[in-house]
Image: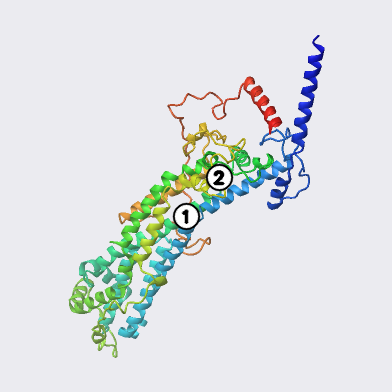
Amino acid sequence: MWKTPVVVFTSLSLLLSLSCAGDVKSRSCSDVRQAFTTKGFSLHNVPHQEIQGEHLRVCSQGYTCCTSDMEDRLGQQSKLDFEKLVDESSHTTRTVFTSRHKKFDEFFLELLDNSEKSLNDMFVRTYGKLYTHNSEMFEDLFSELKRYYTGGNVNLEEVLNDFWSRLLERMFQLLNSQYTFTDDYLECISKYTDQLKPFGDVPRKLKAQVTKAFIAARSFVQGLMVGREVANRVAKVNISPGCSKALTKMLFCPYCGGMPGLRPCANYCQNVMRGCLANQADLDPEWNLFIDAMLLVADRLAGPFNIEAVIEPIDLKISEAIMAMQDNSIQVSNKVFQGCGHPKPAGMGRSARGISDVFNSRFRPYSPEERPTTAAGTSLDRLVIDIKDRLRESKRFWSALPDSICAEDTVTDPDEEQCWNSHTKGRYFPEVVKDGLTNQLNNPEVEVDITRPDTFIRQQIMTLRVMTNKLRNAYNGKDVYFQDSSDEESGSGSGSGFTTEPEVIHTEPPMLEADKSDPQPTAGAAHRQKPSLQSLVSVLVLTALLLCWR
């Protein structure tokens, strides 16, 4: 008596199955084919109608518009799209360091050139051949100052001491040209420089000003270079297999589901980006300390270590020293003769006549209107203010990068109900995880091994730490060591000899702990718990019903 109902039920089931299958097969992949064409992909082997998706490894294995080859190509495209997103989102920050490094470098080198030219012009007019015959000591001074700034292993105090010693020797001979001086006698003269103070207090004041200003300027321009290089390196992301899978699922699995225009939900995007950029976010604390140190040195440059206030009037200060030497020439000469002995008289025809008159020609300082425009038509104050504003904007950049990417309308859909939630169109319910590697243990979208920090990112952290320490020393007026570039052939421009790679320090990987409030993970902590068989069966049943009803 059960035959008829059984037959009827079986027949109805068969008709329902055929009806469902007919509905599924009737779904066209034309939108997907068009989207594929827009992406520049070949339509070879792209189905016209949905097919069974058991061959897919990332996207849903239900009925799909994707073949295995299409899924692979979309996976590669997701990497390229992600790299482009990071590149575009970090472009402004990277450009700030590149452009301001170039601007500051041009300004400083032109400032030095202008100062040297000003000194040369004024001394030629004032001293004529007496200067031109001894100009190499001034050229050497500016050459060494420039070499120090551009990364050379130069001791500024020794450079300045040597300059004043040489100037004393030359002037002493000129003011006492009726005598002949041997090399040993000239060396004896230089030993009395500190005791005699022939140039007054100018050398001491100038040494203090020049050393602090140059230390700050060199450290600052090197800091801009380090920031540029670190930002450029970190922006070239290393995409892990777990990140690649999550990117494909977020960006292109809607294609396989026949919804190529569906963009991901913002919260969903944030979880994927936080997982993929977990190591970049860990750069942020050291990056912020580096920016703070740059701002401190910038304050020094605009204040007590103002290089513009030191370099521009250096010709007047050297002239003041020469005048002091000339005014005290008799006392200085007598003390030298007492200490070093009386020199031999020169032959007939040599005389000091007219030399005192030449040295009596004092310089007239520029009025503000006459001062030449400094580098690139700007002043140090304006340049530093601009750089400081840009530096402040770059703080917390790396931890904010995931949100910056996901805030783009071209990436996510602002409508929480009409976006891709990793499975279908609708709201995304999982919570957004915090940034940083250790917080990715519970990331629902990206499998991240939190026990293996990215060694490359750790190297950049060390590079920033080294530079930050040098900037802090410069802030306190202490000299810092930079590799001598005189024998190097790599790079060009300022600081080409400075290496941003830190010394090799062998350390053990840090022991990272999970949040104490969370349950302790098992041996497979990096992997999420597998669903039960009952759950899988429930999902399969629901999927079958949805396929029939849609």
At label 2, the amino acid type is Asp
Number of numbered discs overlaid on the protein picture: 2
Dot 1 crowding, Cα within 10 Å, few <14, some 14–19, many 20+: many
Q: Is residue 139 left or right of residue 83?
A: left
Q: Where residue 479 is drawn, which disc sits there? A: none
Query: Of label 1 and label 2, which has the lower sequence position?
Result: 1
Q: How is the image coloured?
A: rainbow
Which residue is depicted at the point 70% across and 48% down? 36
Which residue is depicted at the point 32% across and 58% down? 299
Tell me, yes or no, whether the two marked residues, 1 and 2, touch with CB atoms within 8 Å.
no
User: Which residue position holds label 1?
Assistant: 93
Of discs 1 and 2, which sits in the foreground? 2
Dot 2 crowding, Cα within 10 Å, few <14, some 14–19, many 20+: many
Which residue is depicted at the point 49% across and 48% down? 404
Q: Is residue 357 visible?
A: yes
User: Which residue position holds label 2?
Assistant: 413
Question: Which image quadrant for residue 224?
Answer: bottom left
Q: Is residue 157 visible?
A: no
At label 1, the amino acid type is Thr
Q: Quadrant of the N terminus?
A: top right
Q: Secondary structure at mark 2?
A: loop
